[in-house]
Image (cartoon, rainbow, N blue to C red):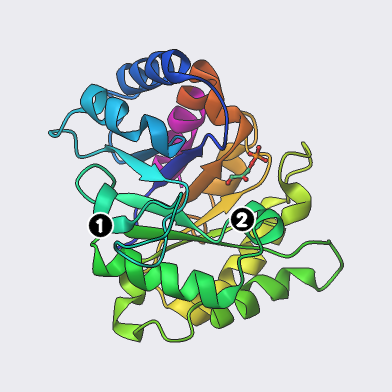
Amino acid sequence: MRRLIIAGNWKMNGDLADAEVLTTMVKNGVANLSGLEMVICPPSLFLFPLSEIIGKNLKHISLGSQNIYHEDKGAFTGEISGAMIKKICRYTIIGHSERREYFGEDSEDVSDKTKAAIRNKIIPIICVGEKKKTAESYKDAAKELKRDLKGVDKSDYAKLVVSYEPVWAIGTGRAATPEYAAKAITLIREVVGLKTPVLYGGSVDAENIAGFTRRAEIDGALVGGASLKAKEFIKICENAVKSKSFA
Ligand code: 13P
């Protein structure tokens, strides 16, 4: 179901004390915001302690992992499965460009992991996006998504979230324009259909978020660096909510 989602991908940053402070501040900071689903994706090691801070009763705040393995259990040293985290994670990021680039994940892995997430009733946030910007490069993300979804049941598409994250915009301070992101997302919707929430990611901050979320095509954001700063992340959530209600 389409809804406003702001997710924070902390990547491999912080220690447990930082994670607990940040989660507590963000949880309190968005307590009065309605019409928003906020997701925190910390390093896996912190998921359990943070789940105790968030508690079981909040609908609008949840945890996501940054990755899962495609099998549920077995001799896979170093891996964490969907089956292990499903009690505390509503979401998992799958196919982030950093996993594709540094850990060699390809579309087959993304498809297998997506199926594993769905099997365990975890919502996959599938990341797609082109490496370099050219006049036509916004078309590549939808093609990548098509490859990633090979073997995934079409009737499960409404259970997914997709994040359009052009690699050239990640961590560079050079976000895509909302118009450019909307063009890519329109093509992504032709693949997944109209019920799937589609987010934008890449150098999102409190200043530029409303430009994205005010557009009907864009259902929220996957935020990297700015999600590590409590005040900034709360402001991103506030501005996103405001922009959707004024749309
Ligand atoms: P930045 O917001 O730091 O550019 O990172 C985006 C990202 O990779 C989210 O998954």
Question: Is 134 above or below relative to 22?
Answer: below
> Residue 102, position in %: x, y?
69, 54
Q: Is residue 106 left or right of residue 73?
A: right
Labelled disc at residue 134? none
Closer-to-camera residue (172/89):
89
What secondary structure prevails in the magenta region?
helix
Q: Quadrant of ligand 1?
A: top right
Determine whether the residue tagged by mark 1 lies in a helix, strand or loop: helix
Q: Residue at horizontal 48%, vertical 85%?
A: 150
10 Å crowding of disc 1: few (<14), some (14-19), many (20+): some
Q: Determine if the magenta segment contains residue 243.
A: yes
What amino acid does circle 2 point to?
Arg
Residue in the picture at 12% in, 33% down:
57
Q: Which mark is residue 83?
A: 1
| Nearest to the observer: residue 64 or residue 236 | 64
Secondary element under disc 2, as helix, strand or loop, is helix
When the figure is inspected, residue 142 is found, relative to residue 45, above or below; the finding is below
Q: Position of residue 76 (x, y in %)?
A: 42, 59
Residue 187 visible? The answer is: no
Task: Give whichever of 2, 55 is nearer the camera.
Answer: 55
Specify the amino acid type for callout 1: Ala
Which residues fall within the magenta stretch?
Answer: 235-247
List the residue tagged with mark 2.
99
The answer to whether one can see residue 59 in this image is yes
Does mark 1's beta carbon lie closer than 8 Å to ligand 1? no
Which percent across, then down, holds residue 189? Answer: 50, 74
How far is disc 1 from disc 2 in space, using C-alphas? 20 Å
The crowding category of the residue bearing disc 2, from other C-alpha atoms within 10 Å (few below 14, some 14 to 19, many at least 20), is some
Residue 26: in magenta span: no
